Amino acid sequence: MTPDPDPPARGSTPSARRATVPMTKEPEEPRESTEPGPPEDKAPLPPDLVAGEHDRRDRTHRPWSARRVPAALVASVILVAAVAALVDVVAVRAGRPAAAWRRHLADELATRPLDDVWVLTGAAVAAALGIWLIVLALTPGLRHWLPLRSPAPGLRASLDRDGAADLLRDAAMRVPGVSRARVRVRRHRVKARADIRFRDPQQVKEDLTAVLDEERDQLVLARPPRIVVRVRQRTD
């Protein structure tokens, strides 16, 4: 005897199955949409693409210097002048005569004309100090550090110029034909000078430029500087 077929599951009849087949959409090949509109996000982007989008949105800046020495100097001068003036004012209020330096300063300011050489010199020095303090307040400083690209918001890193120059110089010394290399890293340009003992200088220059470009890209700098290579044939 042939066994009877399994009874259909409860609530799933052949007619119901035939009715549900058209409702299931089979995966289709991706195709471009003909209607304008933003694309739907069906899968998260890879981490490298996310980092690239973040780098395009938020530019990494150079870290700001604490300016401890200028701040300490300005604070010391202001503190000494304020204490001296306060002590003299308290002494005058107590019935004592004003200090000699304050009387002399008041007389000089009252009697000297504005076109006097000492008045102009003092004004020029004060203006120069003021411009210097404004520049310090509006610029980040730390020009010896190169900012790196940040993979996440709020995360910042920097590379010392001397360290970057050492890495680029080591990469240059690996090029066949280079006997000596000198690399100087600036904010917008990298100057590389190499001495060649053998091989064609033009070919060595092309290989050296390619190697330095690759090494510079591996440093992940926020603003990659331009590579300038100069070679010199040495026969001695």
Image: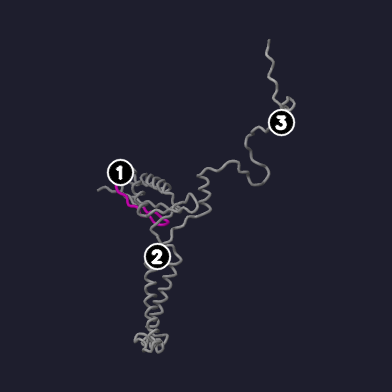
Identify the residue under disc 3. 22
Q: Which residue shows up at 43% across the image and 53% down it? A: 157
Task: Judge whether 143 appears above or below 122 on screen.
Answer: above
The residues bearing labels 3 and 1 have C-alpha atoms spaced at a distance of 74 Å
In this orientation, which residue lies closer to the viewer: 180 or 117? 117
Is 88 included in the stretch rendered in magenta?
Answer: no
Label ID, residue 123:
none
- Quadrant where the N terminus is found in the figure: top right
Circle nearer the N terminus (2, 1): 2
The residues bearing labels 2 and 1 have C-alpha atoms spaced at a distance of 49 Å
State yes or no: discs 2 and 3 in contact (Cβ < 8 Å).
no
On screen, residue 29 versus residue 102, left or right, reads right
Dominant secondary structure (helix, strand or loop) of the stretch shown in magenta = strand
What is the total number of numbered labels drawn onto the structure image?
3
Q: Amino acid at mark 2?
A: Arg
Is 184 included in the stretch rendered in magenta?
Answer: yes
Percent x, y for residue 74?
39, 72
Q: Amino acid at mark 3?
A: Pro
| Of marks 3 and 1, the one in the foreground | 3
Q: Amino acid at mark 1?
A: Phe
Q: What kind of element bears circle 2?
A: loop
Q: What kind of element bears circle 3?
A: loop
Task: Judge whether 29 appears above or below 173 on screen.
Answer: above
